[in-house]
Image (cartoon, rainbow, N blue to C red):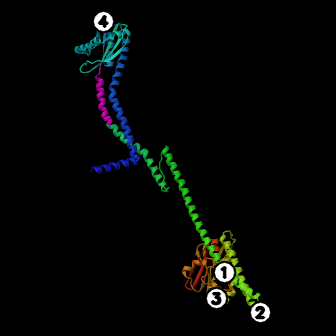
Amino acid sequence: MKIRSIIYKNKLIEKIRKNITWKLFIVTALIFTIFISSTLTFQSLFFGKFYINKKERIIESEVKKFRALYNNTENDNEVTELIRKFEDSNNAKIVIMDSEGKINFITKLDDRGYDEERIKIIQNIIVTWIRDSNLLDEIKRYNKSITFITEKKINGTKNIITVVPDNNRQEILFAVTSLQPVDEASSVIKEFYIYFYMGAIVLILISSLIYTNTVSKPLVKLNDTAKKMALMDFSKKCTVKSRDEIGNLADTLNFLAYNLDKALTSLKEANVKLEKDIEKEREIERIRKEFIASASHELKTPINLIGGYAEGLKDNIFESSEKDHYIDIIIDESNKMANLVADMLNLSHLESGVLKLNKEEFFMDEFIMYSLKKFSKVIKDKNITINFNMIPKIRVYADWDKMEQVIDNFTTNAIKNTEEGGYINFVIEDKEKDKIIVSIENTGENIPEGELNNLWNSFYKVDKSRNRELGGTGIGLSIVKNILMLHDFQYGVENTDTGVRFYFIMDKI
């Protein structure tokens, strides 16, 4: 049980150490409690002395005023009235003694007459003081006033006696006042202090709690916000509405959080962009290497053929009847190399991003019909049927020459992969209110699903064989992709029940 109590005490102390609210509350309450306790203790110890000292000064001053008025009176009635007013105002008794030490005048103590016992005690006090003290001659000689407290009690209470010489009348004025009011006041104040002290403690606790919450609450908010900022969370704002230094600190902290959040967001965006750029550079480098390898492979065969046949012609190893055939092969391979280089340059311009489009308005159905004329011989030779399902007079806005390359490449690809006697469908249909889908579908074998997306890469071919009449270079669909991306048109390829369908989506006017 004792160990548990010690552990609980240690936890409480640790909690207080870590909590500024508890610290402020304890310190504030302790300071005010010490202050109130010290004040009440000081007053309890010195109130009586202070009160008596002030009483002595007041009574001595009042007796001196009385002396001035007394010296201006001429008859006993006026003196009696003057003494009675003084006694009523100061709760004191006046005794007048002549130069011989004889008491000449004492007023009645009340309306019923003299209080002989009290008068006798007052007389004894004065006579005793005169007899036991050598101050009387000094008072007379130097006209000096003194005030003292008697050891002898009247009705159980000590008295204050003020002695003031009156040289004009050669008399000495005595004023006697009881200390009982002082004792009563001290007793009442001490009792009052007990209740006041209890009330003050309660008030101190309440005030300390209010003060602590006023000061610590915004500090706790500042600390919570700072902790969030330390964890890189700048979403929480410090809501301190005061206009003092703490409020200014909260505004500064919120401003700092805003700037840090803004800077961090910018840094993250820059980092994401940098990562994308690095990934893009890696992809470009990969594509470049693949492109060089593919281009080298594509150029190697025609170069070897041209070189071999040229050397054969030079050495006259061929019959005269065969020379024309081999010369045709050399011309054909050189044309293919020229087409490949032209396509590579075209693709390079498209991928560089510096190529500008020269857009114009035209009807898409008429444009397709115009583009197909150049393929009429090949289509006829392969006995391919062309089907049209195109919405007429659809006006579009695009680059005529670049879109002609798109249709040419799609048509070439469709003819190459369509078996003899097959068909190709050209379709224009509405996609949305302001968009159309243009598609070219050819009959033939489906493309494996895993290879569909690879068709857009340079030199990628599902069928590695060439068609001499069409002169494919292997980068036609890559050129198509870049042209459509430059126009911001969507594009794609998909297998159908009868073959393969290429399509793109463009805006209509």
Q: How many marks?
A: 4
| Image quadrant where residue 465 sits | bottom right
Dot 1: what SS? helix
Whichever of labels 1 and 4 marks the residue nearer the N terminus, that label is 4
Q: Are marks 3 and 4 in contact (CB under 8 Å)?
A: no
Q: Position of residue 2 (x, y in %)?
A: 27, 49
Query: Is 195 located above or below residue 328 in the figure?
Result: above
Q: Position of residue 16 (x, y in %)?
A: 38, 47
Q: Nearer the viewer, residue 373 or 339?
A: 339
Q: Which residue is mark 4?
A: 100
Whichever of labels 4 and 2 marks the residue nearer the N terminus, that label is 4
- What's the mark number on residue 298? 1
In this orientation, does residue 373 appear?
Answer: no
Q: Position of residue 236 (x, y in %)?
A: 48, 54
Disc 1 to disc 3, how far (Cα)? 29 Å
| Image quadrant where residue 491 sits | bottom right
Q: Which residue is mark 3?
A: 384
Q: Nearer the viewer, residue 352 or 86?
A: 352
Whichever of labels 2 and 1 marks the residue nearer the N terminus, that label is 1
Dot 4: what SS? loop
Q: Which residue is mark 2?
A: 320
Q: Residue at x 51, y 51 (%)?
A: 254
Dot 2: what SS? helix
Query: Is 88 located above or below residue 267 in the figure?
Result: above
Q: Residue at x 54, y 79 (%)?
A: 450
Whichever of labels 1 and 3 marks the residue nearer the N terminus, that label is 1
